[in-house]
Amino acid sequence: MSAAGHAPHVASALSCVDILVALYFEVARLDPGCPEAPDRDRILFSKGHASAALYACLAERGFFPLSHLAEYAQDGSMLGEHPTRLALPGIEMTSGSLGHGLGLGIGLGLAAKMDATGARIFVVLSDGECNEGSLWEAALWAPAHALDNVVAVIDFNKLQATGRSTEITSLAPLAEKWRTFGWEAVEVDGHNIAELVRALEAPMQGRPRAVVAHTVKGKGVSFMENDLEWHYRPPSADDLARAFAELGGAET
Amino acid sequence: MRTAFIQALTDIAVNDRRVMLLTADLGYKLFDDLSAKCPGRFLNMGVSEANMVSVAAGLALSGKRPFTYSIVPFATIRCLEQIRNDVCSMEAPVIVVGVGGGFAYGVNGPTHHGIDDIGAMRAMPGMTVVCPCDPREAAAATRALAGLGRPAYLRLGRAGEAVLPGTAGDFVLGEPTVLRRGETVALLACGPVAREALRAADLLQDRGIDPLVLSVHTVKPLGSLVDRVLDSSVDHVFVVEEHGPCGGLFEALAAQLARLRRHPRVVDITAPDRFLHAAGAQEFLWRAVGLDAESIARTVQRTLEERS
């Protein structure tokens, strides 16, 4: 997808794809045949630049045909480099500008409480996104309102667009920051599906939860892992062949 | 206007369980009645305008009809990108309410002056922008926007504005209100400064000029305004607005008229394109920038004299 669309952010997608797999295939209650059902769980993909991972999960889960994936980042496609809510079924928010998803998720969570729909809200955030002040406005407000139906998942790969997060805006200790804001916070291996599912499914304790998922940017492709270059560099045909050889999968 | 808005909103909320009010920690005791009558549907979001708008968008996408409330610059420009992406782009039916348009918070200084909000809100794709001129229009606009189902901006004055003649009739978005009948010259007023436009018309009448005065409450879309202007056969249109010259009613109307082969001359009577560093009450600042009745009348008279 990223190679055909000549699109960047492939390493960001590999960083969070396991989180999305856990959410879309194990945790969230969703019906692709009824994508606007009022009681559905919501997955808000706030780190929109990693959309290749989101589109792949939505297509595999049946929200739209897999054949659409070939249109990613092409002229006239509904699969832009950043996802657009009204473009395709299953996309819960328009993202691309960071720091919007958590507030939106809190609004959805409040409405779910008011209407007693039982819906749960999962917001997938990037660690670079944790630089945005609006995210912390949302983080500050939620605990006083007992939103035990909102779960923030932070894809904590410690690399942001142009540098290591420790050198730009240090986030550590990230879980502790959420705790001091009044959230329940857990840390997991963000590439271990079973661990992610346990953290996402554990009974809530009357307040929102932050799941700090320790991840590797570019996970699974040795020459992309932990290399800043792959935030922006679209993969070439050669890169793609090497990556698929390592991953042992077929090119799609 | 503020009181009229809150009373109207409370009445609507009692009958429509979707309606909610979110404030960024402003409006001390103003919402007590709404809060008591509609438990759980009044939320103080704290001094966090960006989060207020994102939360409102989430509520709206779940079928609620939230209104967000703060002083004009904080309700609009402080959280502009949330209004852009979370409300307008996702077509979430949030009504952004700004209190204190123009120089209503005059003594509070330039951080509190609303002289660029209409331009910012008009630039948002799909946004409806409404600036009522008095408490009756404020209440009617609140009712109209509660039923709109699309993103909108409601720009209020403050508390204590007088009711203006001509606003008792039906209120329809996009249909300007006739505040005073007249001919050859039209004063198109936006917001509570309409009071000064009406007083200016009285002054001008004494000088042999008989202006038509409209309250153009809907700045986007302009609706029937252009047709009204052309049908009225006036040859001079003066836009009186408590806003800078960029992006307000003057530019909106001038852009529409410029497309036509023939149209009346359009003249702007607006606040200047700069921040006012001297503090002062609203009436003081109106005089300082030429938006008081005497200055408006003088500008009209001088412009008409230029013609001959």
Image (cartoon, grey):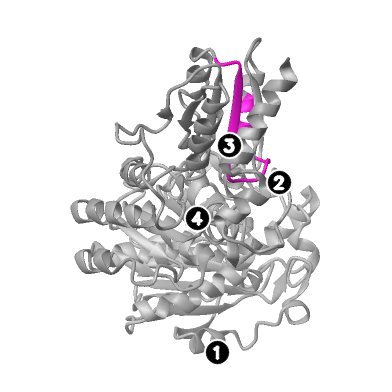
Q: Quadrant of residue B31?
A: bottom left
Amino acid type shown at disc 4: Cys
Q: Is residue B101 above or below residue B182?
A: below
Residue at 30% from the left image edge and 36% from the top image edge: B168
Query: How far across and how far down the image is residue B105, in percent?
Result: 54, 61
* Same chain, labels 4 and 3: no
In front: label 1 or label 3? 3
Left or right of residue B6, residue A65 in this image: right
Rounded to the nearest angstrom, the CA distance separating label 1 from label 2 is 50 Å
Look at the image and say whether residue B239 sits in the magenta stretch: yes
Q: Residues within 10 Å of mark 2 (few under 14, many from 20)?
A: some
Q: Could one spot residue A76 in this view of the protein?
A: no
State if disc 1 and disc 4 touch (CB < 8 Å). Answer: no
Amino acid type shown at disc 1: Glu
Residue A176 numbered tag: 1
Q: Which residues are magenta?
A: B234-255
Look at the image and say whether residue A208 sits in the magenta stretch: no
Reading the image, the residue beneath label 2 is B272
Residue at 50% from the left image edge and 38% from the top image edge: B199
Rounded to the nearest angstrom, the CA distance separating label 2 from label 4 is 53 Å
State if disc 4 and disc 2 touch (CB < 8 Å). Answer: no
Q: Chain of mark 3?
A: B
In front: label 2 or label 4? 2
Amino acid type shown at disc 2: Pro
